Image (cartoon, rainbow, N blue to C red):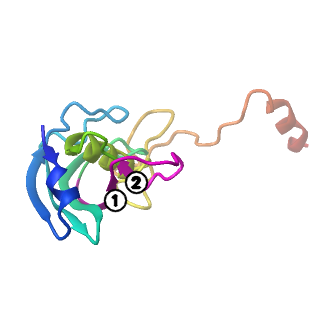
């Protein structure tokens, strides 16, 4: 667990603290996958510039996901950059860009976990033109083709197709 004591940073203008650590996200599940089986590497700096304490860091890892169309496994190197302004307190809760650290100790693991999970794409494809799997026989249409009828008609509208037959 990476905790950064910010007391000295808030008191001394020009002060900075570098960090370089790993974050274990092996317990995080997104859908049916566990994208981070290896630790996520975090490196960055907390700086007090002109009385404003800011955090900037990068998170890098290999994301293990599956294609949303064909279910093929995908291993993608990811590098995300994040920046936050740290404050002791806020008067207005509507500013999402500020990170409040009332006890002057930053839980980097919690913040980075949230940042990384929110940055992951909601839809993952193995390639832009992925054909997916056949809904009838389940074959991966990127690898083979099948003879299944791809035309599916909603049973509620099937009666209307008979009007077009004449």
Residue at the disc numbered 2: 98
10 Å crowding of disc 1: few (<14), some (14-19), many (20+): some
Image quarter (top left, top right, bottom left or bottom right) of the N terminus: top left
The residue drawn where x is 87% and y is 44% is: 164
Question: Which residues fall within the magenta stretch?
Answer: 76-99
Mark 2: which secondary structure?
strand
Instruction: Tell me where residue 154 appears, x and y as whole percent.
Output: 72, 32
Asked if 59 appears above or below 48 in the picture, the reply is: above
Q: Is residue 111 magenta?
A: no
Residue at the disc numbered 1: 85
Side of 131 relative to 48 (left or right): right
Mark 1: which secondary structure?
strand
Cα–Cα span, label 1 and label 2: 5 Å
Pointer 1 with pointer 2, Cβ within 8 A: yes
Q: Nearer the viewer, residue 153 or 58?
A: 58
Side of 124 relative to 20 (left or right): right
Image quarter (top left, top right, bottom left or bottom right) of the C terminus: top right
Residue 99's disc number: none
Q: Nearer the viewer, residue 110 or 101?
A: 101
Q: Nearer the viewer, residue 18 or 122?
A: 18
Q: Earlier in the sequence, mark 1 or mark 2?
A: 1
Q: Is residue 85 visible?
A: yes
């Amino acid at each position: 667990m990476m905790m950064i004591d910010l007391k000295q940073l808030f008191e001394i203008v020009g002060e900075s603290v570098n960090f370089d650590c790993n974050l274990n996200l092996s317990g995080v599940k997104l859908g049916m996958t566990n994208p981070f089986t290896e630790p996520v590497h975090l490196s960055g700096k907390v700086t007090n510039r002109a009385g404003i304490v800011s955090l900037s860091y990068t998170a890098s890892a290999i994301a293990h996901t599956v294609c949303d169309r064909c279910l093929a496994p995908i291993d993608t190197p990811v590098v995300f950059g994040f920046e936050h302004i740290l404050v002791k307190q806020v008067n207005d809760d509507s500013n999402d860009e500020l990170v409040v650290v009332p006890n002057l100790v930053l839980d980097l693991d919690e913040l980075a976990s949230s940042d990384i999970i929110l940055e992951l794409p909601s839809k993952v494809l193995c390639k832009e033109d992925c054909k997916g799997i056949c809904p009838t026989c389940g074959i991966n249409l990127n690898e083979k083709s099948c003879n299944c009828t791809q035309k599916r008609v909603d049973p509620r509208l099937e009666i209307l197709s008979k009007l077009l037959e004449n």
